[in-house]
């Protein structure tokens, strides 16, 4: 029963992933000169993987501080929590090794353990320590998307950050949590969400509204073909977002960064914990 339910869940996710990317042509399967892992899972599956990994990191941090964790241990936990039968099935979903996936995440640092412990020689990881918000600056990151290879750039979009495509006067706004995914997946997800918006609310939308949304969907799909260069702008008042690789990315800094809401919440929880320990 449990195994059958797990298989049904995986089949359901595969259907969602295929339908999610249906509005646009698939991105190229080679990354040319861009180094690193290809985020060519569906947006939803990538998000599930990143979210679950973040929960694992938080658990380790609360119990062991800034300790390093082996990639193999995290992979085993992900298999259990996400319903994969084994590491091979997980890596099949990733279309690559789990270690390469970890190395590609902008908010994760990795190394080969060399402390003489039982983890000696293994790949270990932990969240990158980030600068306190008092030492960060707001910024605008700007990059010109010149070829389909650029669609494999990995975007780390902080919760308060906004992605702008000035050629279309289009924005992907602030969200409740950070997003880490390929640029291709972020655009394809926007296409899917807009298409579902029309499908779900079709009867209540004016014809003019439908026409405008459909036109935006068409224009976003054209961006994925990169027939002509277009501009990606990443506005971040918290100074936490990243674009990988950084080659060709122009960063303009502004004033003092603001504290991210999730960051503020974690800080207050930590302060309350420390206060409780002192008492």
Image (tube, rainbow, N blue to C red):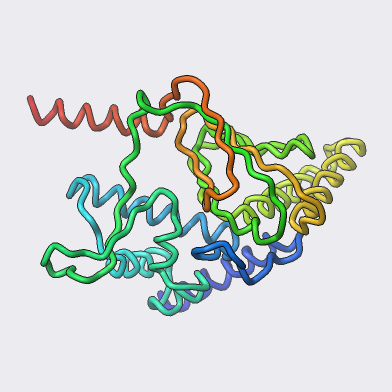
Q: Is residue 194 above or below residue 262?
A: below
* The one of 200 and 172 positioned closer to us in this rendering: 172
Residue 160 placement, left or right of 105:
right
Q: Is residue 85 above or below residue 258?
A: below
Measuring 33% from the left and 30% from the top, which residue is drawn there? 132
Instruction: In the rendered view, tell whether residue 231 sits above or below residue 265.
Output: below
**Rendered image quadrant of residue 3:** bottom left
The residue depicted at 40 percent of the width and 48 percent of the height is 107
Q: Position of residue 129 (x, y in %)?
A: 31, 42
Residue lying at 43% horizontally and 67% vertically, measured from the top left: 100
Name the quadrant containing residue 99.
bottom left
* Residue at the extreme top: 255
Residue 219 in the figure: left or right of residue 238: right
Residue 277 screen position, x and y as percent: 10, 31
Coordinates of residue 233 in the picture (x, y in percent):
64, 38
Q: Is residue 70 left or right of residue 213?
A: left
Quarter of the figure with the C terminus: top left
Residue placed most toward the observer, 208 or 173:
173
* Quadrant placement of the N terminus: bottom left
Image position of 196 (left or right of 235)? right
Q: Nearer the viewer, residue 35 or 278?
A: 35
């Amino acid at each position: 029963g449990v195994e059958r339910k797990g298989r049904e869940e995986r089949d359901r996710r595969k259907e969602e992933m295929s339908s999610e990317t249906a509005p646009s042509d698939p991105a190229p399967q080679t990354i040319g000169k861009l180094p690193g892992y290809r985020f060519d899972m569906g947006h939803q599956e990538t998000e599930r993987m990143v979210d679950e990994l973040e929960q694992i990191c938080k658990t380790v941090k609360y119990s062991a501080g800034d300790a390093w964790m082996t990639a193999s241990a995290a992979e085993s936990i992900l298999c259990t929590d996400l319903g994969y039968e084994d590491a091979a099935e997980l890596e099949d979903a990733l279309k690559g090794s789990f270690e390469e996936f970890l190395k590609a995440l902008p908010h994760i640092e990795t190394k080969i353990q060399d402390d003489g412990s039982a983890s000696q020689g293994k790949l270990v990881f932990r969240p990158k320590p980030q600068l306190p918000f008092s030492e960060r600056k707001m910024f605008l990151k700007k990059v010109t998307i010149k070829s389909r290879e650029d669609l494999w750039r990995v975007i780390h979009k902080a919760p308060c950050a906004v992605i702008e495509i000035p050629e279309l006067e289009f924005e992907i706004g602030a969200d409740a949590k950070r997003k880490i995914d390929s640029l291709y997946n972020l655009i394809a997800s926007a296409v899917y969400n807009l298409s579902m918006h029309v499908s779900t609310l079709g009867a209540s939308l004016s014809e003019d509204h439908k026409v405008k949304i459909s036109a935006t969907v068409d224009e976003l799909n054209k961006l994925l073909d990169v027939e002509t260069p277009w501009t990606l702008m990443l506005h971040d008042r918290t100074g936490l977002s990243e674009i990988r690789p950084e080659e060709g990315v122009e960063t303009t800094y502004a004033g003092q960064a603001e504290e991210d809401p999730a960051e503020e919440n974690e800080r207050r929880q930590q302060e309350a914990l420390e206060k409780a320990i002192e008492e």
